[in-house]
Amino acid sequence: MQEQNAISMSIVKVNNLKKTFQETRAVDNVSFSVKKEEIFGFLGPNGAGKTTTLRMLTGLLKPDRGTVHINGWNIDKDPLKVKMKLGVIPEVSNIYKDLTPLQNILLAGRFYGIKRSTITGKAEQLLQRLGIYEQKDQPVSEFSKGMRQKVSIACALINNAEVLFLDEPTAGLDVHSRKLIREVILEMKKTGVTIFLTTHDIEEANQLCEQIAIINRGRIAAIDTPENLKRIFKESCAVEVSFDRMPPPDSLSQIEETKHVEKRGDKFRITTASPDRLIKHLASFAEKENIAFTHLAVLGTSLEEVFLTLTEEGK
Amino acid sequence: MSYTILARSTFLVTEKNIRIYYNKPPVIIFGLLFPFFLFLSFFMGRELDLFFFFPGLLAMSLFFTSSSVGPLITPWEKQAGTYERLLSYPVTINTIIMGDILAGMMFGICINILVTLVGLIYFTYPLQLLIFIPALFLGSFCFSTLGVLLASPAVRSPSQVMMFSSLIRFPLIFISGIFIPLNELGEVARALSYISPVTYFVDLLNYSLTGQHHLPLLMNFCALLAFSALFLSLANSFHRKNHLKGL
Ligand SMILES: Nc1ncnc2c1ncn2[C@@H]1O[C@H](COP(=O)(O)OP(=O)(O)O)[C@@H](O)[C@H]1O
Ligand SMILES: [Mg+2]
């Protein structure tokens, strides 16, 4: 293991994962690796295959093909050994409602063979950090969704995991819980934990992640840092226009500086390397055709743009 | 090291089940009242000699109590979302199955030790503990395994599972030799009785309480073992196949 770490600092290595449910190709040839101590974001719309991938990474689901190595161990061959080092927060809130937060965490910790007294001490710290210490002995059945999610997080943090897998940890929560959970995630990273996080929230991925994989329909559309993802797209910006009258078909694609024209509703989206020059050409085109702009905008290269472009390509 | 993990997780799943699913007043009260209702519905007002029918009552009681909650644990946990979290701990599907079985087994044994004590107050049986105790353990293991097997089909709602499990469990009682002694059964009924594990268990209880039996003791034990192994392997393969359905 030491040698492997010397060759690469990747702690999670995923090779050609595939999973099909009946007709649906939920995950299709997904490969990536996560470096030690980074936050790796898996960003995609609903049904993209995020949960299915995470389940295969954590040994819950057997892939049809492909391999997952965590810290050099094959999850398929040594599931117990690997699971000892993992913390998982599944997508649905999932703690025992008949138990209190402290009992839930105690049960979780004992699965890893940690001593009761150690668990209790750590649990109290975690509950304090997550702001639910006062409720530690109340039945969970009376908790809000945000509070349950915090207990769930505490359960996943109790074994000092080396790698954390979080499936949309902030989805559907209130603003305060979301903020707190993101802070805790960043603190965990600082203590040397590697984090794999799925989300459909672009801002969250941008805020937290060092690497983002954009997944759509089971395939990875891009993997890079948030900055690079934005930069790639700066090189091909888009200008969105609409006119009071339809221009003749194909006339737009004849304009200089135009790379590609796409009609969206009553608007045209024209990709270009140089938006300012394209706009000049567009203006003279409008004058020549005797039509007027009703809308003209240069589309920024927010991560959202990148995301939308990448995830709409497959359709 | 991984044997320690397996043993620990089996133990913790068992403990969790007892704490969350069995240690509930309705479950315990139902478990205690059930043998009493069986007694009322089958034996009251009939010209039956309860001395000879008590072993059958005890068998029925053990069968139902050991297998009543097992079918529901997995559907309940899937519905509550706790099943996926449980799977993410260092456990295997086998340790979860075994934990579910052991909890049902312990529940059945505890309730029915009480029922036995009540029986021993009223009747003086020449109790054969050396047969009775292993029979009680093996029987409750076998029936609890059946219960856990009944939890494995990919049905979502606990109420559907309850229907399905009654549909399987009641016939197994009716075809067994509880109501009519084996040697008084017709040929077809007799052949049918051999496909219920309850038959062999009743025979063992009959022997250890009243001293009478129809089948060789060793055959009874072997049959219960064989049924347990069959249920266990079916439970294993069905749970494995369906473990993520309905999450
Ligand atoms: N157990 C399952 N059986 C059948 N189809 C499934 C199952 N789990 C997921 N799918 C399908 O696989 C695709 C990906 O699902 P999922 O991984 O849950 O997406 P995400 O988490 O990104 O929303 C979806 O089309 C979903 O319907
Ligand atoms: Mg999902």
Image (cartoon, coloured by chain):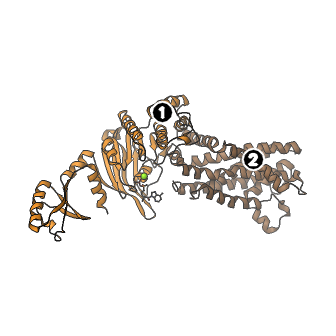
Separation of residues labelled 2 and 1 (CA atoms): 45 Å
Q: Which residue is mark 2?
A: B136
Residue B88 in the image, given as x and y percentages of width and height: 49, 45
Within-10-Å neighbours for mark 1: few <14, some 14–19, many 20+:
many
Within-10-Å neighbours for mark 2: few <14, some 14–19, many 20+:
many
Q: Colour of chain A?
A: orange
As helix, strand or loop, the secondary structure at mark 2 comes to: helix
- B141 or B211, which is in the foreground? B141
The quadrant of the image that shows the N terminus of chain A is top left
Residue A228 in the image, given as x and y percentages of width and height: 23, 47
Which quadrant of the figure has residue A137? top right
The amino acid marked with disc number 1 is: Leu
As helix, strand or loop, the secondary structure at mark 1 comes to: helix
The amino acid marked with disc number 2 is: Leu
Q: Which mark is residue A127?
A: 1
Which quadrant of the figure has residue A139? top right
The chain to which mark 1 is attached is A
Q: Is residue B133 visible?
A: no
Residue A274 vertical placement versus A143 (above, below): below
Q: Is residue B88 left or right of residue A26?
A: right
* Quarter of image, ligand 1: bottom left
- A220 or B134, which is in the foreground? A220
